[in-house]
Image (cartoon, rainbow, N blue to C red):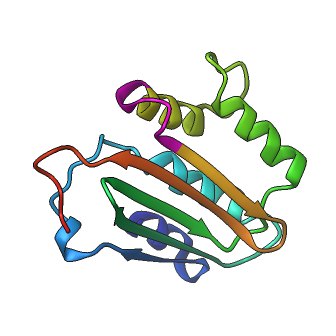
Amino acid sequence: MKLHAYRYNDRLHYKVNLPDDLHDIEIPKLLLQPLVENAIKYGYEKQLQLMITITVEQVGEELHLLVVDNGHGIAPEKLREITETLHEPLNNGDRIGVYNTHRKIVLLHGENYGLTIQSQLGEGTSVRLVLPIAKGEKHV
């Protein structure tokens, strides 16, 4: 995020909300990278400044990672296509990063985990990534 912030100067702002008691929970490498890159790539459409917020929270026995941007958002029909692609056994489209992230989580942890995407045109997009917290990593 710091590198992107330097690259875009005052056009990109970000905030990370990570509670101290969740700092030591490990997640698969590069899990958030495609989500942040998509927020930057598509968030800048039709605007000059972008705010990305990453929030990490424990919900019961799950870890929720939320990437929210205040970009232009995704049209409903496009969002439906993206969501349908996430649940396909093979990716035949161009949504490689989001698809691979979702499939990695599903393959590692099962169908109850993975990505959900919500978006509203003119208001931005939020991507929620849900993972189980492994035994021994529980932080309440």
Image quadrant where residue 88 sits: top right
Give the side of residue 122 with respect to residue 26, left or right. Answer: right
- Per the image, is 22 magenta? no
- Say which quadrant the C terminus sits in: bottom left
Location of residue 134 with respect to 84 vertically, above or below: below
Magenta range: 107-114
Left or right, 10 with respect to 105, comes to right
Vertical side of 20 occupied by 88: above or below: above
In-front residue for pair 30/118: 118
**Residue drawn at the location 48% of the way across and 51% of the way down:** 129
Residue 74 spot, x, y in % from top left: 80, 56
Could you tell me residue 53's position as x and y percent? 50, 73
Residue most toward the front?
A: 60
Task: Residue 37: give x, y in percent of width and height.
Answer: 55, 53
Looking at the picture, how far across and down is residue 25, in whole percent? 20, 55
Q: At 74% across and 33% down in the image, what residue appears?
A: 84
Whether residue 139 sits left or right of residue 130 in the image: it is: left
Of all residues shown, which one is farthest toward the left? Answer: 136
Name which residue lies at 19% across and 75% down: 20
Answer whether residue 110 is magenta in the image: yes
- Figure quadrant of the N terminus: bottom left
Residue shown at 53%/56% (left/top)? 128
